[in-house]
Every structure is written in structure tokens, then in C-alpha cells.
Amino acid sequence: MLMARDGTREDSHKLHKRWLRHQAFMAELAQNKEWLEKIEREGQQLMQEKPELAASVRKKLGEIRQCWAELESTTQAKARQLFEASKADQLVQSFAELDKKLLHMESQLQDVDPGGDLATVNSQLKKLQSMESQVEEWYREVGELQAQTAALPLEPASKELVGERQNAVGERLVRLLEPLQERRRLLLASKELHQVAHDLDDELAWVQERLPLAMQTERGSGLQAVQQHIKKNQALRREIQAHGPRLEEVLERAGALASLRSPEAEAVRRGLEQLQSAWAGLREAAERRQQVLDAAFQVEQYYFDVAEVEAWLGEQELLMMSEDKGKDEQSTLQLLKKHLQLEQGVENYEESIAQLSRQCRALLEMGHPDSEQISRRQSQVDRLYVALKELGEERRVGLEQQYWLYQLSRQVDELEHWIAEKEVVAGSPELGQDFEHVSVLQEKFSEFASETGTAGRERLAAVNQMVDELIECGHTAAATMAEWKDGLNEAWAELLELMGTRAQLLAASRELHKFFSDARELQGQIEEKRRRLPRLTAPPEPRPSASSMQRTLRAFEHDLQLLVSQVRQLQEGAAQLRTVYAGEHAEAIASREQEVLQGWKELLAACEDARLHVSSTADALRFHSQARDLLSWMDGIAGQIGAADKPRCPSSHLGLPKCHWQPLSAAPCPPTVPYPRKP
């Protein structure tokens, strides 16, 4: 605070230092403002944590803020005071220093030396440019000082002194402009003259240095040597073309100065004529050499291309003359793919042959001295190319035939193996253990025969078609293919025959097992009927009925009628099987048939006995039933006769006899009981 309020006046040479110290103090004050903010935050936190201290803390913070505001206000006031005091002295000193510098520059411009060579002129121009830059900087500095003077609230005496210094410096700056411009004009004119003369000498030396390269006659022997010369000449021409704008610009400048009438301009005119002549000669020589080299390049390029084509054709011929046709289908296919690529390469190479022919015609039209040799080489290349294409076609046909032969052999082997596998299945001796087993075998074999027939016919037709097509195309192994075809067809016919035999055997086995199965089933039914007969002949309980026994017997006999057709079918099947089988099978069939027929006869005999038994039992049951009915009737009549009712009047006596005779008229007549038949 004391430092900010210190208002002592000092002399001008210490004023600036005091101003700097005050600026440092202001910077320190700005940095300490963060410390004040930190105290504010800590005070707020303290008031929140300890409300009982809030009043004293708030008062203390207010005092600190007030002191800080007074400090900032005093500091700003002191800064303005120091700035105003030091600025006037600085302005006066600044104008005085500028006036001294301007006076020194005026003395330098009095010495006018245009320079005797280009280096001297360039040095003078650099000095002049430095002076001009300095004057521009002084102009900016004077402008800044004027702005500062206008902005400062100076005292009248200080303001008058500053104004005098400012006017003197401004007048001296204006007087410097004309000498500077005149000095620049003279130096630029001298520089242009010396520069053009120097550029003419440089360009002439550049042209003379490259003229021997453009005029040499060496062309080289061989394509590579000619190409090297062409590259060098092309590089020279590109260099000439790239340098052309620069040289034309020098010639244009020299032409402008050559029109002047002065001793210096005469030297420029001589240099201009020499450079124009040398420049035209250089371009013409480079163009002529390019034409000569191009003609030599065409000839060497043709010979080089012919040699490359002949070498390439020779390499392809060696590849296509190979006798290797592959050891199997895969290797042959790989060889065929490679050969097709070779053939495609040869076919694509036709454009190179055509390009070579066009080169040949162009050289012949040019009337080249080696036209006869060129034509002979071209004819040789054409013959080699045609022969190579024929050789490639021959090689491709051979590989294709070998590939198809391997493919056919593979398909024949696969089909033969497939037929052999099917023959194993078709030749199986398994005929089934029983009817169910043989039925399953027959069903599976039917599916097998259907699938095998369909697949086999398709595969055999494909192989036969392939053989026919290859033989028709003139394959070299046509005889071998025909043998393979005949062998496959024979094997297929044998397989079909074997499958037919297997189908017949399974059908016969099925009939045999079906006979035994039907016989077992029929015998079981017969035995079951035999077991039921005793229950049929027993009188029903608890109240035997003749009609129910007869109905049951008739139902049983109806069931037997169903078995009659089965027995007849069994006999017919046995008779048919005996025509097919002999030996043990025939004996087993006959034995089984006899067993069933014996059981059937026994069942019929038992049924007849049961019928007689049921008939006699029914007669007995009817007799007993009628006897019971008569006894019951007689008991009723006896009861009516012995009744205790007495008539009380004559009319009631008349009715009694009638009542007594009515039950007699309703009594059942005793049935006629037949005599039992003798067994």
C-alpha cells in the first residue's frame, strides 16, 4: 500500500525505471488476487462449519476486501501518474534520436557511386534497400509517436516542445524521399546494363558447352547403345527446352538495351548477335541428331524384337514337344491346363507378330539398306509361328485324348467295382429264417433291385455314350474302349440275371415260409376250436336251455366253415410247393400238410360227436322241462279241487263245475318224447 501511494517526483532518467518497478508491483498484485480469493473461500467454509464465528469472520472478510479495493485504486492512480510523467520525456528523446539518424542518412546520400560492375551495383542496391527499409520503419515510428502525443493529456509547455520536435523530424523525412528515389533509379539502370551483359556471357557459355553434344555423330552398335545415345540426346533436348524461356527472356532484355545509343549498349549488341546464332545452331543440331538416332533405333529395335520373338518361339516349341502325357487323370489334367495356357499365350502373342510385321513394313517403306535381310527375317518368324500353333494343336489333341482315356478308365473301374459290390448283395445265400424275416429280405431286395437298376442303367448309358463319342471322334485307343464297353455290358447283364435269380429265390422262400406260417396259424385255430368243444357240449348253468346250446353249436359250426377255405388253400399251396421243392423241403411240406389235415379231420369228428351230444342233451332238457310243467299243472288242479268254498245258493252250484274244468282245458299236453337213437 505504501509503495502504491509513493508520489515523490524524480528526474527523467530515473522516471522510466520507476515506471518499470511499478509495473512489476502491479503484476505481483494481480498474482496475489488468487490468494485473496482463497481467503474468501476459506472464510465461507469456516462460516458454514462454525456458525458461531460467522459474524467475526464476515467482518474480517469485509475489512480485507475494503483494504484490497483501496490498494487497487491507489495502484491504478499511481500508474497513471507515472505514465503521464514519463511519456512526455520519452517522446522528446525519441524525436531527438530520430532527427540524428535522419541527418546521418542525408550525409550518406550525398555520395553518388553508380558502380563499375554488377557486384558493386548489387552491393549499392542492398545498402539503398536497407536505407529505404529504415526510412519506412522511421515513418511508422513517427506515426506511433504522433498517436501517443495526441492521446496523452500533456501540459502546455511539454506539448509545445514535443510538437516542435515532431515537425522537425517530419520535414527531414520528407526531404529524404527524393534523394532515395533518384539513387534507386540510377542504381537499377546500371544494374540492368551490367546484368544483361553478364547474362549474355553466361547463356553463350551454356550454349557453347552443349553444342558439341548435339553435333556428335556416334550412334552406337546395338539397341542398348542406341538407347543410351537417345536418352542422352533427349535429356539434352529437354534441357534446351527447359532453358529456352530463360534464354529468350535474356535475348528480349538484351534487345531492349541494344537499341540505346551508348558505349555500354554496343557491347550488349555484339553479345546478343553471338548468342542468337549459337542458340539457333544448338537447337538445329539437337533435332538432326534426334532424327538420326530415331532411325537407328527403329532398325536395332526390329532386330532386337525379332531375336526375342525367335527365342520365345523356340522356348514354346521345346515345351510343346514334350512327350509326357501324365501318369493319371489328375496329372494329365494339370498338363492339359498348362498346355492350354501355353496355347493361349501363343494366341495372344499373335499381336506381337503383327506388330513386328508392321515394323518390317515401315522399315521397307523407308528404303533401309538392310531391307532384304529384314524381309527374310520376318518370313522366318512367320513360318516359326505357324509351325508352333500346329504343334500346339497336335499336343492339345493328344493330351485331351489321354485325359478322356484316363477319365473313361476311372469311370469303367468305378462302375465295375460298383457292379461287383452289387453282385455280392445279389448273390447272398440268405433266404430268411421265417416268414417275417424273408418278407423283410424281399422288401429290401426289391428296393435294392429298383435302385440298382435305375442307377446302373444311367451310369452304363453314360459310359457307353462316352465310349461311342470318343470312338466316333477317332480316339487312338478306340479298340481298348470297345473292349471296356463290352466287358461292362456283360457284367451288367450278369448282375441283372443274378438279381432276377435272387428275386425268384426270395419269392419261392417267401411262399415256403408263408406255407409253414399259414399251417401253424391254421393248426393253432384248429386246436383252439378243439379246446372250445368241451365247453359247448356242457349244459349252461344255472338254467340249462336246449335252444342256447344249439345256437352256440351252430355258431361254432359257422366258424368252422371259415376254416374250410383256409384248409383248401393250404392244400393247394402244398401241392404247388411240391412241384418246386424236393427232398427235405418236400417231405417237410407233406408232413406239415398231413398234420394240419389230421387235426382238421379230428376237429370235424369231434364236432360231429358234439352235435350228437348236444342233440340228445337238448331232447333230455326238453323232456325234463315238459315234465316239470305237467307236475306244476297237476299241483294247481289238485289245489283247486281241494278248495274249501261251498255254494250258498243254487246259482253258485251251477258255476262250480265250470270253474273246476277250466284249468283242465288250459293244461299243456304232454309232448311226445322220441326214443333215443342207437349210437
Image (spheres, grey):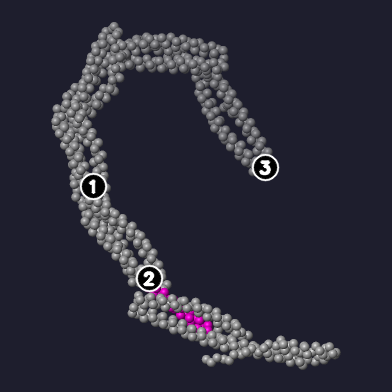
Q: Tell me which amino acid carries mark 2.
A: Ala
Q: Which residue is mark 1?
A: 396
Residue drawn at 51 percent across, 25 percent down = 20
Distance of label 1 from label 3 (alpha carbons): 109 Å
Question: Closer to the N terminus: mark 3 or mark 2?
Answer: 3
Residue position marked by numbered label 3 in the rendering: 51
Quadrant where the N terminus sits is: top right
- The residue tagged with tag 3: helix, strand or loop? helix
* Residue 315 in sight: no
**Furthest residue in direction top, as rendered:** 261
Q: Tell me where residue 285 sits by quadrant.
A: top left
Above/below status of 67 relative to 528: above
Residue at the image point whose x is 68% and y is 87% from the top: 668
CA gap, disc 2 and disc 1? 56 Å
Q: Is residue 532 magenta?
A: yes
Q: Position of residue 213 (x, y in %)?
A: 20, 23
Would you name the residue on which mark 2 appears?
Answer: 507
Q: Give the prevailing secondary structure in the magenta stretch.
A: helix
Depth order, front residue of 657/565: 657
Question: Is residue 256 visible to us here?
Answer: yes
Q: Disc count in the image? A: 3
Q: Front-most of 451 and 246?
A: 451
Q: Is residue 272 above or below residue 594?
A: above
Q: Which residues are magenta?
A: 506-533
